[in-house]
Image (cartoon, rainbow, N blue to C red):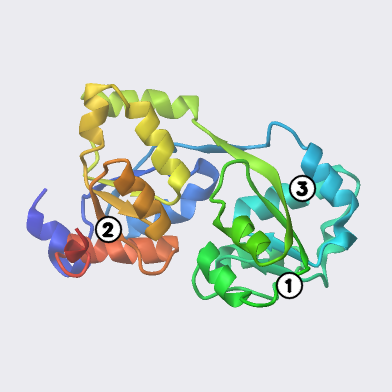
Amino acid sequence: MQETDKKKSGSLAGLRVLVTRPRHQAAPFIALLEQAGAVPLVVPTIAIVAPASWAAADTAITRLESYDWLIFTSVNGVHFFLRRIEEQGGSPAALRGRRIMCIGPKTAAALAEFGIDTRVQPERYQAEGLLEALNGTTAGLRFLLPRAETAREILPETLRERGATVDVIPVYRAVFPPDSARRLDALLDGTEAPPELLTFTSSSTVGNLVNYCAGHEPGQRLLQIPAACIGPVTARTARDAGLDVRVEADEFTIEGLLEAIREWAAGGAGEQRR
């Protein structure tokens, strides 16, 4: 591939990009990459499945009226929690009119599909942005946070420090997909041409790839390939794991990630993020 082809007007022509996003969420990102001329190598490093136990969620569902606010931090959290409400004989409509806050426009859109409005949506698509929006308004309030089994603790911990009661309930978890292990093996042993850029949309996608490649020499070579991350939290996880993060999106969406990759490929602002 000609280097000039990649850099022409931010084009990604022929750039081999590893997509680690969960398969059911990867299609929009794959389409964006293909439209830009890139060659997506789809190897999800996480699959989203139900939690090991629904006990905490089921208890929370029976007492939704006791919470002042519900917080959703991801589309997965919305889908799994609302599906569980239905499985328990209820309806997502029970959340309409309740005070709900969420992180990111995609999460808000997932709620809107069920006719559920979001009252608080911070401009910064991360926990810190939500905490800024709630500053000084949490003492004595009860919050319900349906989320992944493993997640950052800054949001519930800070709310509790501010005098709130927070019930954190796991509604999904991330596991490593067996099919991806076979595809990664093909990339690691030379059967298939390796990627030229790794992309990560969450800390879980980083951690699962790093864990799979640990102690495996070809895997270590894979982790030396430049990486692109959707935002500062994911980028910090990747850097802490020793990855070479060259790209960090300013807007924490797949569209923002693509734009940052374009800048990097063109040798502009993205290249300076190294």
Residue 73 visible in rendering: no
Residue 93 placement, left or right of 1 = right
Q: Nearer the viewer, mark 3 or mark 2?
A: 2
Instruction: Please tell me whether mark 2 sits on a helix, a strand or a loop.
Output: strand
Residue 186: x and y in percent read 30, 24
Q: Quadrant of the C terminus?
A: bottom left
Image mark for residue 148: none
Residue at screen point 60% across, 38% down: 173
Residue 134 placement, left or right of 81 = left
Residue at screen point 74% across, 33% down: 53
Residue 70: x and y in percent read 74, 62
Q: Label 2: how many residues lie within 10 Å, few (<14), some (14-19) or many (20+)? A: many
Image mark for residue 117: 1
Which comes sooner in the sequence, label 1 or label 2? Answer: 1
Residue 52: x and y in percent read 69, 31
Instruction: Please tell me whether mark 1 sits on a helix, a strand or a loop.
Output: loop
Q: How far apart, in angstroms, are the residues tagged by discs 3 and 2?
A: 35 Å
Image mark for residue 83: 3
210 relative to 132, above or below = above
Residue 244 placement, left or right of 65 = left
Q: Label 1: how many residues lie within 10 Å, few (<14), some (14-19) or many (20+)? A: some
Examine the image and state in which quarter residue 119 appears: bottom right
Which comes sooner in the sequence, label 3 or label 2? Answer: 3
> Where does label 2 land, which residue?
247
Instruction: Please tell me whether mark 3 sits on a helix, a strand or a loop.
Output: helix
Residue 24: x and y in percent read 55, 45
222 relative to 131, above or below = above
Residue type at tag 2: Val
